[in-house]
Image (cartoon, helix red, strand yellow):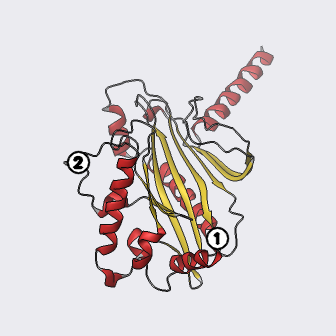
Amino acid sequence: MKKYLLVAALLMLLAVLCLWLAVTPSYYERWDIRKAGEYYFGHHGYDFQLPVSSVDQKVWAFWQKTGFSVFTKGKEDFFKAEIPQLDCTEPLSEAVFKFLQEEIRAVAKRLRDTSLEPRQLYLLYSAQHFIVHDSTLIRTFQKGLCTSEVVSLKDYWCFYDDAASHEGISIKGRNFVLNGSAMQEIELQDLFDESSGRDWFAVLAKEVEADLRRQGHWLSDDEYLPFEQFHFDQFLIVEEGLKIIFQNYAFDSGIHGFPVAYVSWDLLAPFLKPDAPVTRWYEEQLQKR
């Protein structure tokens, strides 16, 4: 009899330990290798259809789960993030990498801190579906231009919320320069000379519209035209010029469309801010031609 009681007590302790592990938030961060052609999957194996690398790539990986709770109908929130190794010229690339690391850690902490907030529980229980699935958020970065003066990356946000019927994906353009000895993340207007007024935007908007039409996109006058500056919030700095990114479903693109318009430096050069980091980089490129 005592033997059975001992076994029962051990099983109860094991059950308590398993429950404690299930409800405890956990995370890790480490260096990893993303294999060439490897897809990005969510917690339940869903392919998020993100661009895959053609070569093996060293990445800093972060993973977190918020922990099981009866208050959230048993669902958990999973967060994954990857930052590619920025092996371009220091110190800018090193500063950008550390900045993005801290940004990822801050997002993870916010998810942990807010998973059981009253508002989140209200939204969860007011949903039409009683049974919900675990939610997944993936952040991953695609390295673009990477020099001693300019670092430009695509920032992918992939999310599959509880009770959602399908995933969502958005892209942000992240552009960093070395301003003196300090790293600075820049916005579109930071590239241009203030004395030119809005002339730079008129040229930019005209070329974006022309390039989109050349690609066959249908632009609705009542929805997009005339363009406003906020339409161009997401951009990348590339060797040829500016790459303006639009979200999926913009124009006639459909899901995963992400239309892109290119505007050459030749058109923008007269309006660039004198002696600014991007201007200096562009002038160096001209000398190499």
Q: What label sits on residue 286 in the rendered view?
A: none
Distance Cα–Cα, label 2 vs label 1: 37 Å
Q: Which residue is mark 1?
A: 147
Classify 182 as above or below 5: below
Q: Are marks 2 and 1 in contact (CB under 8 Å)?
A: no
**Residue 242's spot in the image, x, y percent?**
47, 63
Q: Position of residue 19 (x, y in %)?
A: 61, 32
Instruction: Please name the amino acid that badge 2 sits on.
Output: Glu
Residue 285 x, y percent position in the rendering = 60, 74
Can residue 183 be seen? no
Of the residues shown, which amino acid type is indicated by label 1?
Answer: Thr
Q: Does residue 232 appear to the left or right of 242 in the view shown? A: left
Q: Nearer the viewer, residue 281 or 19?
A: 281
Vertical placement of residue 182 versus 154, above or below:
below
Q: Which residue is at 47% across, 29% downward? A: 133
For numbered disc 1, what is the local secondary structure? loop
Which residue lies most toward the right here?
Answer: 3
Q: Residue at x 68, y 38 (%)?
A: 38
| Sequence-earlier tag: 2 or 1 | 1
Which numbered tag is attached to residue 223?
A: 2
What residue do we see at 66% from left, 55% from top? Answer: 84
Query: How many numbered tags mark residues here?
Result: 2
Q: Quadrant of the C terminus?
A: bottom right
